[in-house]
Image (cartoon, rainbow, N blue to C red):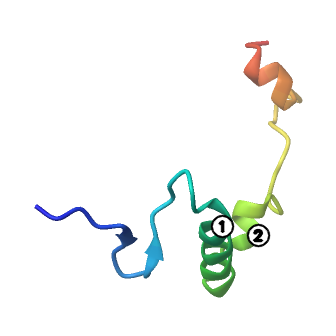
Amino acid sequence: MESSTRVTGLGIELLNPSNYKIWRSCMESYLVGEDLWDVVGGAYTTKPENGADADDLINGG
């Protein structure tokens, strides 16, 4: 079985230790084109209803 280094259908090379910069650029371009970048980029973040912040959630309190 042949291992693929590209994401099927996207033409984006899989992330590996030596290609982060180009992978990031390609992935960001793809997500912008699909109108998904705002979701990944944090534009739609909301504080939990109970008022806890991220540190409280991570530390269990």
Image-quadrant location for residue 35? bottom right
Amino acid type assigned to the residue bearing label 1 in the image? Arg
Q: Give the residue drawn at x 83%, y 48%.
A: 46
Q: Give the residue drawn at x 77%, y 14%.
A: 59
Residue 4, label in figure: none
Query: Looking at this view, is 57 or 13 the one in front?
Result: 13
How many numbered circles are shown? 2
| Crowding near the residue tagged with mark 1, few <14, some 14–19, many ≥20 C-alpha atoms within 10 Å | few
User: Which residue does the numbered mark 1 point to in the structure image?
Assistant: 24
Q: Please report contact status of discs 1 and 2: CB closer than 8 Å, yes or no.
A: no
| Crowding near the residue tagged with mark 2, few <14, some 14–19, many ≥20 C-alpha atoms within 10 Å | few
Instruction: Locate the C terminus by quadrant.
Output: top right
Amino acid type assigned to the residue bearing label 2 in the image? Asp
Relative to 12, is 56 above or below?
above
Query: Looking at this view, is 32 or 3 the one in front?
Result: 3
Q: Give the residue drawn at x 66%, y 74%.
A: 36
- The residue most toward the bottom is 33
Q: Along the horizontal axis of the image, is 10 left or right of 57?
A: left
Instruction: Locate the N terminus by quadrant.
Output: bottom left
Q: Along the horizontal axis of the image, is 24 left or right of 17?
A: right
Q: Give the residue drawn at x 70%, y 61%.
A: 40
Q: What is the spatial separation of the Cα atoms under label 1 and label 2, in whole angstroms?
A: 15 Å
For marks 1 and 2, give the one nearer the viewer.
Answer: 1
User: Which residue does the numbered mark 2 point to in the structure image?
Assistant: 38
Assign a secondary structure to mark 2.
Answer: helix
Q: Position of residue 34 (x, y in %)?
A: 60, 83
Image-quadrant location for residue 7? bottom left
Assign a secondary structure to mark 1.
Answer: helix
Mark sitting earlier along the chain (1/2): 1
Image-quadrant location for residue 20? bottom right
- The residue most toward the front is 18
Q: Along the horizontal axis of the image, is 31 left or right of 6?
A: right
